[in-house]
């Protein structure tokens, strides 16, 4: 089946449910512009947000929250924050440990698109995506600009297609 045929099948899916997790030691619900952007874009695309959570950049706490959502009745978990190289940036390591399948093309294409916007600093991003326990998982930088880029250019155009594939359709 061609990509177009897969996408056409996926269009029939009802609104998908996603969890949004912001990893930050400093953000609150009021100051979390990146989490708010993810929710806005998901809802505009017709999807539903099961919950929005802010968790400190602590591997054990990130792991606990991620595990909770991987056990929940949702199709996707989107994390923002903790993907850089600062000493407390540990989201990528936590996410990578639970992935059953990594989608390296996501990070590669994201960094390419980022390069077009911000230049060489794009290679500092460790954004990644994959599948864990039958759910799509995306780990995005904390920057609102980066979140919008990933959501609009990569995640939303393919989310229904990904979920359709995971359901075996």
Image (cartoon, rainbow, N blue to C red):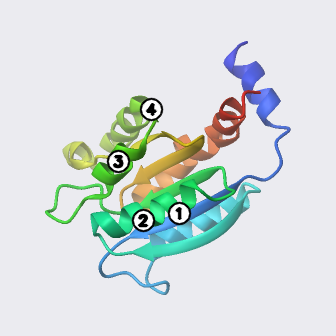
Residue pointed to by mark 3: 117
Q: Is residue 143 visible?
A: no
Task: Classify 10 Å Cα crowding around label 4: few (below 14), some (14-19), many (20 and above).
Answer: some
Task: Classify 10 Å Cα crowding around label 3: few (below 14), some (14-19), many (20 and above).
Answer: some
Q: Mark 4 or 3 closer to N-term?
A: 4
Residue at x 81% of width, y 37% of height: 11
Q: Where in the figure is residue 168, as x and y percent of width and height?
A: 72, 27
Element at badge 4?
loop
Element at badge 1?
helix
- Residue extending furthest toward the left: 87
Residue pointed to by mark 2: 64
The image's mark for residue 103 is 4
Q: Are marks 2 and 1 in contact (CB under 8 Å)?
A: yes
From the viewer's side, name the closer residue of 144 and 7: 7
Element at badge 3?
helix
Q: Compute the Cα span from label 1 to label 3.
A: 35 Å
Task: Classify 10 Å Cα crowding around label 2: few (below 14), some (14-19), many (20 and above).
Answer: few
The mark closer to the camera, 4 or 2, is 2
Q: Mark 1 or 3 closer to N-term?
A: 1
Quarter of the image where the N terminus is located: top right
């Amino acid at each position: 089946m061609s990509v177009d045929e897969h996408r056409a099948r996926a269009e029939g899916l009802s609104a998908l449910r996603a969890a949004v997790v912001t990893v930050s030691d400093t953000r609150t619900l009021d100051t979390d512009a990146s989490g708010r952007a993810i929710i806005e874009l998901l809802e505009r695309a017709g999807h539903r947000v099961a919950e929005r959570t802010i968790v400190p950049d602590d591997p054990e706490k990130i792991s606990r929250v991620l595990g909770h959502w991987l056990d929940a009745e949702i199709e996707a978990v989107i994390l923002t924050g903790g993907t850089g190289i600062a000493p407390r940036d540990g989201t990528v390591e936590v996410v990578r440990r639970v992935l059953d399948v990594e989608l390296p093309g996501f990070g590669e294409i994201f960094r390419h698109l980022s390069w077009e916007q911000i230049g060489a600093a794009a290679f500092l991003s460790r954004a990644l995506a994959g599948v864990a326990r039958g759910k799509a998982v995306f780990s995005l930088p904390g920057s609102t600009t980066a979140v919008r880029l990933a959501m609009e250019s990569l995640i939303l155009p393919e989310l229904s297609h990904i979920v359709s594939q995971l359901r075996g359709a």
